[in-house]
Image: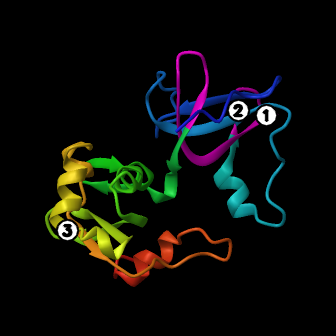
Amino acid sequence: PGSVGIPIPGTEAYVVDEAGRRVAPGEVGELVIRGPHVMKGYWEDEVATARALRPGPYPWEKVLHTGDLFRSDEEGFLYFVSRKDDIIKTRGEKVSPKEVESVLYSLPGVREAAVVGVPDPVLGMAIKAVLAVAPEAGLTERDVIRHCAARLEDFMVPKHVEFRAELPKTDSGKISRRQVAEMVGAA
């Protein structure tokens, strides 16, 4: 996927690790926004405001922790990876469902795909792919896992694959990962 661009003039956007330290280009972390365009807070929601707005380098300044995972390139262009809340931790690694879904959509016959974490006694969480496929595709769980194994790191390959006629959608027509998780008992 392409870049979302660079910050507007007068605004700084950078990527930080879990400790709040800036990361090198190419590394994934949370996007932080600094500048006069940063909001003052969420309307009548002090908890959400405290979670998102944190002290900046100056005593009067707040920076916005977006909750989005990004990476940047050497020129400062920003690339969306995933929502921080969507990340699945498995085998000591962090997996972005969107990265796995992108590979699943490259498999001929896949119409809809959602990736969720499901409890696993050994891994903590295991990757599960839930797919709606064209009937004529004739895809099996083994086909899907092989396709992913050839394109993803081992820890990102789904351990489980489930086929459905269609996946639940939000009111705006997007696949609802939350409803998929509930449907397969992951929530």
For disc 2, the marked residue is: 56
Residue closest to the eye, 124 or 140:
140
Screen quadrant of the C terminus: bottom left
Q: Earlier in the sequence, mark 1 or mark 2?
A: 2
Q: Is residue 65 shown in magenta?
A: yes
Question: Measured along the vertical axis of the image, is residue 110 above or below residue 7?
Answer: below
Q: Is residue 118 shown in magenta?
A: no
Q: Residues within 10 Å of mark 1 (few under 14, many from 20)?
A: some
Residue located 61% across and 75% down the image: 170
Residue 25 x %, y %: 48, 22
Question: Measured along the vertical axis of the image, is residue 73 above or below residue 119?
Answer: above
Residue located 19% across and 61% down the image: 143
Question: Are the two marked residues, 3 and 1, in contact with CB atoms closer than 8 angstroms?
Answer: no
Question: In 3D space, how far apart are the residues under numbered discs 3 and 1 (Cα atoms)?
Answer: 51 Å
Q: Earlier in the sequence, mark 3 or mark 2?
A: 2
- Left or right: 153 as drawn, with respect to 165: left
For the record, the magenta segment spans 55-79
Question: Measured along the vertical axis of the image, is residue 85 above or below residue 30?
Answer: below
Question: Measured along the vertical axis of the image, is residue 37 above or below residue 125?
Answer: above
Residue located 84% across and 63% down the image: 43
Q: Earlier in the sequence, mark 3 or mark 1?
A: 1
